Image (tube, helix red, strand yellow):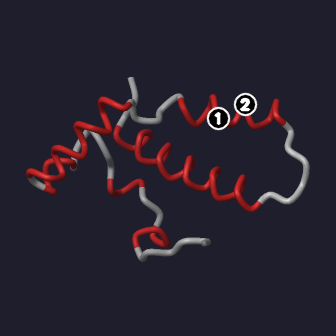
Amino acid sequence: MTTGTERTQALIYAGDFLEELAASKDGLDFAMLKERARHLLRHYPSNMEIGWIANAAAQSPSAIMGPVLDPSAVPEEIQKGFRRW
């Protein structure tokens, strides 16, 4: 079972991975990319969970706190709006 903390971290790490991939100028190691993608997808929310989060957020922002996402798992620099791009 995936916890809210693991799900939150998976979203953050997936974004970091995509940013690194987009900025990569070297040749790509596809075996490494597949392994990293598999690791990220282990706790990544399903499409159904993403839809549930979106619906809950539209109805009540406080409804998405709890087991779905964990705000304490978000690093401080991300909470402050830091983006590499």
Point out the image quarter for the N terminus: top left
Considering every residue shown, the one lying at the far top of the view is 1
What residue sits 14% from the left and 55% below the top?
62
Residue pointed to by mark 2 = 34
Q: Is residue 77 left or right of residue 19?
A: left
Q: Are marks 2 and 1 in contact (CB under 8 Å)?
A: yes
Camera-nearest residue between 69 and 34: 34
- Where residue 59 appears, x then y in whole percent? 9, 51
- Where residue 15 appears, x then y in whole percent? 55, 53
Residue pointed to by mark 1 = 37
Point out the image quarter for the C terminus: bottom right
Q: How many marks?
A: 2
Circle 2: residue type: Lys
Give the image quarter of residue 60: bottom left
Give the Cα distance between marks 2 and 1: 5 Å
Q: Is residue 61 left or right of residue 84?
A: left
What residue sits 69% from the left and 36% below the top?
36
Please, what secondary structure does the residue beneath circle 1 have?
A: helix
Circle 1: residue type: Ala
Q: Is residue 6 above or below residue 16?
A: above
What residue sits 32% from the left and 56% below the top?
71
What residue sits 47% from the left and 63% below the top?
75
Q: Residues within 10 Å of mark 2 (few under 14, many from 20)?
A: few
Q: Is residue 11 left or right of residue 49?
A: right
Camera-nearest residue between 49 and 76: 49
Camera-nearest residue between 23 and 3: 23
